[in-house]
Each structure stands twice: as C-alpha cells, then as structure tokens.
Image (tube, rainbow, N blue to C red):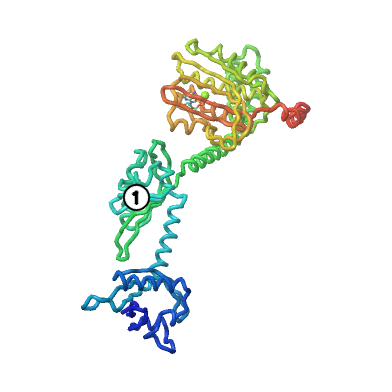
Amino acid sequence: MPVGINLKDIDGRFVLINKKFEEWYGKPEKGILGRLTEEIIGEPSAVIDARMKQHRAVVEQRKVVSRQEKKKRADGTVHVMEITKFPIIDVDGKAPLVGTVAVDITELKRAEEEIRKLSSVVEQSPTGMIITDTKGTIEYVNDAFTQMTGYAAKEAIGKNPRILKSGQTPSNVYERMWATIAAGKGWHGTFHNRSKNGTLFLAGATIFPIMTEDGHISHFVGTHQDITQRVAEQNLLKQAEKMESLGNLAGGIAHDFNNMLLPILALTKMTIKRLPNSSEHRERLEKVIQAAIRAKDLVGKILTFSRQEEAKQAPIDVGEVIDETLGLLRTTLPSTVTIEERRSLDGAKVFADATQIGTALMNLMTNAADAMEGRPGTLRVSLTRAEIGLDDAESPKNAKPGAYAKIRVKDTGHGMDQNTMRRIFEPFFTTKEVGKGTGLGLATVYGIVTKHGGFIDVASEIGKGTTFDIYLPVMDEQAGGSNRAGKEEILQSVD
Ligand code: ADP
Ligand code: MG
C-alpha cells in the first residue's frame, strides 16, 4: 500500500507494520516489532502523550480517531502526516489490537498553503476582481470590486456582471469581448460602468478564461480598475497640447501675415497721399486700407490667443475691469437681457494686463449675450475669492492650489452639448453662422487666462444656460508687498 499501515497491541507495541512504515522508520538495529514508537524515533513528550491518549481512546471507547502531525523520518525529512487509528475487534467483542493508517499529506498541505497565499493576493488586490462561471454568473468578487461598484459580495454573487452596465458602452464592445474570451483568449478594453448608487465610472478591464487541464473553459476572470480620473487627466493634457500646437501654428502664420500687411498699409497710405483729392481711386484705396486694418485686427487676436503678444502686467483691480467691460457692453446689449452683478471680493489685486483681462471678459459676455439670442435672459457676473486646496474634490481638475479671484460669467442661454464643449477653446471653432462667429473668442480667453497663470472651468446644460468661471491668481497683501512689487517696478521702468 502507498500509505503507512501498522497494528499495535493494547500497550502500543508494534505487532505488524507494512513496507511503507519500514521505509519511513529506516531499519533500526533492535528491530521494530514488539517496541513502542518512541523507542524507534525520538519524539518530544507532548507528541508521545497525544499518541497515547489517542491510543487509549481507541482501545477503551472503540472509536476511530484522526490527528495531523509533523513527523521526522529516518532520512531527516519532515512530513505532515494524517494519522487515523481504529480498533480491531475480535469475534467475542474484545479489541485486542489498534490499527493505524498514516497518509503523507505534505504535498496537499503545501498546495493548500499556495492556494491560501494566492487567494489572499486576490482578496487584498487593489484591482477589482470578479470570477464567473461559463454562463457569466458571478461566483466571487473581492473587496476592491465592492469598493469600486458599491455591490457587496453577497449582492453580486449569483448575479450577472451586467448589473454594472450603464447603457453607455457600445454593444459591439461586449460582443467582441465575448467572442474573444469564448475563443479562450484574454481581452482588454474599457467599459462605461454604473455603480450601485448610480455614479458612472470608466473601468479599464482585462477579462480572460480559466482553462481546465483538458482544454475546456471552466470560469472567466475579470479585473477592473477605475480609470475615470486617469482618462480625464489625459484628456486635459491632450487638450492643452493641442492648444499649444495650434497656438504655435497660428502664431507663426500671424507673424508672417503681419509683416505682409505692413507694406500694404504703408504703401497704400503713401499712394493715397499723392493722389489728387478728386481722384476716383481714392475711395477704392481707402477700402484697401480698411480691409488691411481689419486683417491687422484679426492678426492681433490670433497673436493674443497664441500667447505671443507681450502682456503688460501690473497689479490691477479685477472689479474695476468688470465694471468697465460691463459699461461698454450695456450700450450694445439688447434690452431683453438683464445684467446682474455681484461682488464679494473688493479691492483685491491680480497681477495682470488689464486690457487683456477686459478682452477676455468681453468675449465671454458677448458669447453669453449671443447664447440668449435676443430672447429674455439674465447675464450674471460675479467676482469672489476662491481658495483651492491640495486635494480639493470640488476644484477643477487642472487647478493649482492657491488663492484665486474667481470671475463667473453665467447666462440663461441655449447652452451646449458635450461635443461642442470639448471643442470651444479651439481657434476657429464656431457653431455660429458664417459672418457671425470667428471662433476666436474663447481661444483668446484661453490664451489670456493661461498666460496669467489662471484656469477656466465651464459648465453648461442644453436649454438652461452656461457658466464660465475664470480663476486668476490673487495677490495676497504680504506677498504683494515684497515679491510682486519688484516685478512691477521693472515693468514700469521699461514702460
Ligand atoms: P464664436 O463666438 O465666434 O463662435 P467663441 O470661441 O467665442 O467663437 O465660441 C466658440 C463656440 O462656443 C461658439 O460658437 C458656441 O457654440 C460656444 N459657446 C461659447 N460661449 C457660449 C455660451 N455662453 N453659451 C453657449 N455656447 C457657447
Ligand atoms: Mg465669441
């Protein structure tokens, strides 16, 4: 037999042992039969006691008893043994012998330990893990899954992973995923998932089948990571890079274009001067000059958003700039638009170019007015102070911590959808009809605000309106006294 078998008398002396036991004990000089185990192998007294106790229980109560024990063999190796003792009862009901069967479970124990190790990795893993049967019924989820989705293990088990569907993942993604894993291969991709409380999140997922030894699929394993934040950050970065390269491109063209405009303007002006007053060419040439001036104006705008125009920065009161801009705007705004102004930040200074900040505000306010399209509406402008902390959940994603002057321009206009919103800062992006929009307004705002170390936050809802928040770093009294003042002096002396 591949297991150890022996018989002992009621005193615990060997009556018979099989080959396996002989192997384990080696060949002791005095032999094995007629001796106690402890006479053959050295054992601590606790082990001897445990064995004797078991032995007596078998003899006296005629029970079958088992225990597990680590045993040192004659060859020095240590093995985990499962030892079962049973009474051998003769015809007249006496139990003169005790049988022992010893099974080496060392390998089994090692495998168990291995499994325990692996399963604790799965349990503690920061990646959400899910195991389903071949039909997709959930058999296991780990803690990270529960944290990410809000579903406790007992709520998820027995259900299908489709409880996470938000309806926003294209159905062909699921189709491709099933086709891949059913073919026995691993699949990577992204799901738009919905957690138990309704929050949407982007899950980066890897799903793969577990195969049996004979090549059949027994289970599917899914690992999920919430990548919402990471993707949002990548998009911001991509957006910033796009703006940068568009700015560089447009700025380069604008410079060259400007150089071409200069001789057009100068030479046309010279020519007009030499023409007799009565000349019919005068009017035509005046038109050339007007067109060239408009072109210069456009070039100026492009240079502003491409941030290649020098800013004349000085400590300015943003409240005053808002007042001036609103003053200019009031005269052109239709009477259907009500203007509301609120201010809780008075006298605070921002180190900025007042003309440029004025231009940015004007662009935002004209857009707001355009969005209300002559229908009754309200344009709200407010100025407040915003402190942005290191890990402020409320703050915009691209915000640096610090104190800011926050200018809000809010309208009750037509709003915009996600697709429009994604592109509004691109130069020349407009949804307005030809002749009405240039698509340079927000590109300019972006250029100006970024140059001033600030950032922009937009929120919009179709049919309800749009809110633009401009954050400009505010100069604190103390900081303003030392650090900024130096810069201001230099600028003034340059002027
Ligand atoms: P333009 O005003 O010349 O179209 P902008 O760069 O100023 O160019 O704006 C780009 C686009 O952003 C607009 O065409 C419009 O679709 C959208 N937009 C900007 N501001 C608003 C707003 N307040 N409400 C709705 N849509 C807006
Ligand atoms: Mg505009």
In the rendered structure, which amino acid carries the disc numbered 1?
Met
The image quadrant that residue 180 belongs to is bottom left
x%, y% of residue 267? Answer: 66, 25
Q: Position of residue 217 (x, y in %)?
A: 30, 59
**Residue at image location 44% in from the left, 56% down from the top:** 120
Q: For this rendering, which residue is in front, 495 or 298? A: 495
Query: Which residue lies most toward the left here?
Result: 91
Q: Mark 1: few, some, or many residues within 10 Å (few <14, many ≥20)?
A: many
Give the residue at mark 1. Answer: 177
Query: Where is the N terminus found, in terms of image quarters?
Result: bottom left
Does 419 sit left or right of 255 as displayed?
A: left
Residue at x 55% of width, y 23% of height: 408
Judge by depth and name the residue closer to the eye, 278 or 351: 351
Q: Quadrant of residue 270?
A: top right
Q: Quadrant of residue 191?
A: top left
Q: Quadrant of the C terminus?
A: top right
- Please, what secondary structure does the residue beneath circle 1 have? helix
Residue 486 screen position, x and y as percent: 76, 30
- Against 241, residue 324 (above or below) is above
Above or below 164: residue 454: above
Is ligand 1 closer than 8 angstroms to the Cβ of mark 1?
Answer: no
Relative depth, front residue between 157 and 425: 157
> What residue sits 43% from the left and 42% below the top?
202
Question: Outermost residue, right direction?
Answer: 493
Q: Residue furthest top?
A: 335
